[in-house]
Amino acid sequence: MERRVRASFVMKIVTSHQMRELDRRTIHEAGVPGKTLMERAGAGTVSVMEDTFGVMKGKTVTIFCGKGNNGGDGFVVAGLLRQKRSNVQVCLLAQARDLKGDAKLMYQRFVKEAGRSKVVSNPSPDRAHRLVRDSHVLVDALLGTGTSAPVTGPYQGAIQAMNLSGAPIVAVDLPSGIDADNGDTLGTAIQADLTVTFGHPKLGLFLGSGIDHAGRVHCVDIGIPNQYVEDLSVSIEMLTPTMIRPWLPKRPASSHKGTFGHAGLIAGSSGKSGAAALAAKAALRAGAGLVTVATPSSVQASVASGVPEVMTLPLPETADHTLSRDALPILQPFLQSRSSIGIGPGLSTQAETAGVVRTLIDQCDRPLIIDADALNALAGHTSLLRSRPISPILTPHPGEMARLLGESTASAVNRNRLGIARDFARAHSSVVVLKGARTIVAHPEGATSISPTGNPGMATAGTGDVLTGILTGLLAQGVSPWEAAQSGVFLHGLAGDLAARVYGYPSLMAGDLLASLPQAITQVLHALPSDRQAVP
């Protein structure tokens, strides 16, 4: 049950069918016995449990096993925990005679070492409730990735008992009752605190209810050959520190501020100077050498005093103190003299301003981020995106994406976040960052990434402005739009996760992300390849 470090390990996100194919090829073509994969999965689960909950010696752990391979993984976990002197009890929701193949082998191995008294077959509801009530940790190894029908009967009762127990729950591979492909809840589902998934993360962990039920996710490398993964028609990757680290700009000793580009931000209006300030600070924190904020003249002093490290360019404004069309002669040379442009934070939806935004998008030939009110200005005018020399990065939340699509509500977007992001990117030659729980990044040629970072505390004003600044800063340093989008999204979420450890979710503010961004960047730069990858 050795642990391997493979620097080339690529974290693809797979469907249940694709994972079964990977398992099949690994067993039949690479010659790795199924029981070896099962042993590696169980060993990885126990290792992550120790990392999360500390030494397991003396702790009471109840493992709920089904009759399939997921249950076999559970018996491996049970045996290893027993070796570590945990007080282990297994609830098998079947009879021993129902077990087959590797699952039967792992059951027999466990019983030989621990005795039959440590396995309760088909426990009554009362027995199940007593066991979970007395447990320090629960392990869900009931249902695997092949489940697609509603959960009923004893399995439903076991899931409900675990969820009501108050004890932390570790899901093996996937929370039981969650569809592995779309994240839907199949009637009832485990509310896991920790999910340890094997080989490659399952798509359902990043979509729908799967996000809420998975808890913290770790992926354990069980030795699936990379070539088999590359042979699949998989175009979805999970962002990891080791993946994005090579994309972050180096800082040679001979550097000066001009080395790292000049980011330009077109942002702000009366009452919304904070959006411009947050984006400007984020661009600097992301490493841009210089940052200039072009903003309505009545807002300029506020932005300048709030961020003394940036330059400002006051612009003609409308009677509503928003960007006016008279600003265009000033902004056109501004576009040409900047390494990257971010447009949208706090600009307002005022009609004249929206027209200015569309003109600027049409004329800009620099790496470009389009966010917030600039996205709203594009509604009904998305054809402007298709003729750009460099793919722009769009950063809509579901409501803004709905407006770009001509939909009345965000619900249509949320029902198919992955497909909509991918289709829009292809149709409009753009890199799409569809924000939300598990932000999706889509490439114009169809590749897609999902970020495991971020948390509910980031659902607060200003965090999107921070993301825009990070992306603009990375583009200013010469990072490509695709790599900047992926890196920026991961760092943004990681900064939020680090800040949440200090402030918690309810109290988190956008400024807290800015304060944690340097730590996030440093953490990624010092990341080492690992056989486990965690969702922070």
Image (cartoon, rainbow, N blue to C red):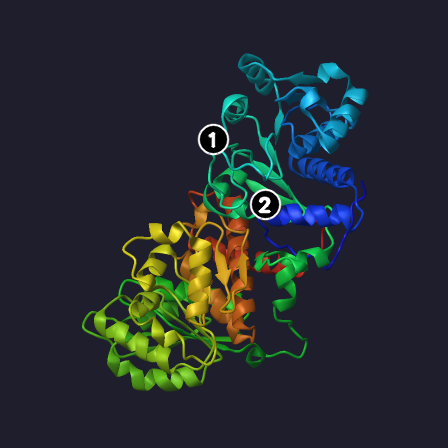
Q: Secondary structure at mark 2?
A: helix
**Alpha-carbon distance for marks 2 and 1?**
19 Å
What numbered label is drawn on residue 90? none
Q: Which residue is nearer to you in this view: 291 or 137? A: 137
User: Residue 334's spot in the image, x, y percent?
Assistant: 39, 83
Q: Please, is residue 391 above or below residue 192 in the view?
A: below
Q: Please, is residue 482 above or below residue 65 in the view?
A: below
Does residue 241 appear anywhere in the picture? yes
User: Residue 482's spot in the image, x, y percent?
Assistant: 53, 68
Name the mark nearer the viewer: 2 or 1: 2
Q: Is residue 204 left or right of residue 303?
A: right
User: Residue 90's spot in the image, x, y percent?
Assistant: 67, 22
Q: Residue flagged by tag 1: what amino acid is it?
A: Thr
Q: Secondary structure at mark 1?
A: loop
Q: Residue at x 77, y 24 (%)?
A: 108
Residue at the disc numbered 1: 188
Residue at the disc numbered 2: 16
Q: Which residue is nearer to you in this view: 56 or 225? A: 225
* First in sequence: mark 2 vs mark 1: 2
